[in-house]
Image (cartoon, rainbow, N blue to C red):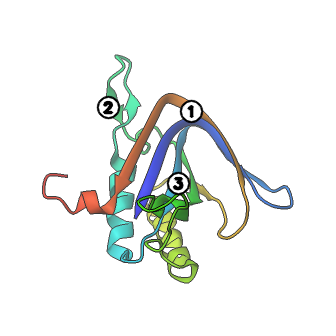
Amino acid sequence: MRALIQRVLQAEVRLPGGEARRIGPGLLIYLGVGQEDGEDAAKKLADKTVNLRIFSNPQGKFDYSVLDQKGEILLIPQFTLYGNLKGGRRPDFTDAAAPDKARPLFDLFAQFLRQAGLGVKTGEFGVPMAIDSLSDGPVTLWLDTEMLKRKNF
């Protein structure tokens, strides 16, 4: 799994038909699911995400997590995080999980975030979405479950 995580003051996803899902201060997370991912990857990435200390204390040092801040999460499915650009000019997405595998793991990741006590709103699979956000910082981080397999991570 791959996650692009942005600290935001607010974020919103608009779905076809005009439905909007909004959050206040918290995290905007774009989540990609790979072919080799499973429940363990979702759990590890969720645990890492909710405990990342990327919110500043009064001295400006990263000291608080989204849990500490009682922030919200807007979670967006993003298969293009698995785009391979090595050959040619068109991305190859063969490393991304097919929707029938990715959707349940996306839902499981969201469930793990909710179980940690966070308010989570999500985008939808397979539909065009418009996403607006007001970055805070800006703070943008990349997490990949391949990194989490390393001993020191």
Q: Residue furthest top?
A: 59
**Mark 2 highlights which residue?**
63
Disc 1 is placed on an element classified as strand
Dot 1 or dot 3: first in sequence order is 3
Judge from the rendering whether residue 38 lies leftward or rightward of residue 5; answer left or right.
Answer: left
In this rendering, is residue 104 above or below 15? below
Query: Which amino acid does the dot numbered 2 rest on?
Result: Asp
Marks 2 and 3, how far apart at CA? 23 Å
Instruction: Find out whether the residues at labels 1 and 2 contact each other: C-beta distance under 8 Å.
Output: no
Residue 110 percent across, percent down from the top left: 51, 64
Query: Which amino acid does the dot numbered 1 rest on?
Result: Ser
Give the label on residue 135, or none: 1
Q: Residue furthest bottom?
A: 100
Instruction: Find out whether the residues at labels 2 and 3 contact each other: C-beta distance under 8 Å.
Output: no
Residue at the image position 42 percent from the left and 45 percent from the top: 67
Residue 33 percent across, percent down from the top left: 46, 69
Marks 1 and 2, how far apart at CA? 18 Å
Residue at the image position 34 percent from the left and 69 percent from the top: 41
Which is nearer the eye, 2 or 124? 2
| Quarter of the image that includes the N terminus | bottom left
Residue 47 percent across, percent down from the top left: 34, 58
**Quarter of the image where one finds residue 145:** bottom left
**Mark 3 highlights which residue?**
30
In this rendering, is residue 16 above or below 27? below
Dot 1 or dot 2: first in sequence order is 2
Marks 1 and 3, how far apart at CA? 14 Å
